[in-house]
């Protein structure tokens, strides 16, 4: 027992973190790509100029 939690709860917490990290990395890459595309689309435009 560490910090009042049984070993199987620690195992569950570690598994959840290990599974969620790849999803977070994928999500951050997708958000970064979307922001770059949005910036490139509007880069150099003034007002209503298209």
Image (cartoon, grey):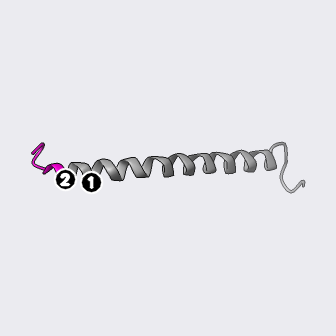
Q: Main secondary structure of the magenta part?
A: loop
Q: In the rendered image, which quarter contains the C terminus?
A: bottom right
Q: Position of residue 42 (x, y in %)?
A: 80, 49
Q: Is residue 17 left or right of residue 3?
A: right
Q: Secondary structure at mark 2?
A: helix
Q: CA distance from mark 2 to mark 1?
A: 6 Å
Q: Could you tell me how many numbered marks the image carries?
A: 2
Residue 20 location, x and y as percent? 43, 52
| Residue 6 is covered by the magenta coloring | yes
Q: Which residue is mark 1?
A: 12
Report the residue at 85% width, 48% height from top: 46
**What's the mark number on residue 2?**
none
> Which residue occupies the foreground of this view, 5 or 41?
5
Q: Residues within 10 Å of mark 2 (few under 14, many from 20)?
A: few
In the rendered structure, does residue 44 fall within the stretch colored magenta?
Answer: no
In percent of width and height, residue 19 lies at 41, 51
In the image, taking residue 29 as reference, residue 38 lies left or right, namely: right
Task: Assign a secondary structure to mark 1.
Answer: helix
Residue at the right extreme, as displayed: 50
Do callouts 2 and 1 mark residues in contact (Cβ within 8 Å)?
yes
- Check disc 2 and report the residue beneath it: 8
The percent position of residue 21, horizontal first and vertical second, equals 44, 47
Q: Is residue 20 left or right of residue 32?
A: left
Going 13% across and 50% down the picture, which residue do you hit?
A: 5
Q: Which residues are magenta?
A: 1-7
Residue drawn 68% across the image and 51% down it: 34
Residue 9 relative to residue 44: left or right: left
Q: Nearer the viewer, residue 49 or 10?
A: 10
Q: Assess disc 1: are there few (<14), some (14-19) or many (≥20) residues with their C-alpha within 10 Å of its C-alpha.
A: few
Looking at the rendering, in which quadrant would you find the N terminus? top left
């Amino acid at each position: 027992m560490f910090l009042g939690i049984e070993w199987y709860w620690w195992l569950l917490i570690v598994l959840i973190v290990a599974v969620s990290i790849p999803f977070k990395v994928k999500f951050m890459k997708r958000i970064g790509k979307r922001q770059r595309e949005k910036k490139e689309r509007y880069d150099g435009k003034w007002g209503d100029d298209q």
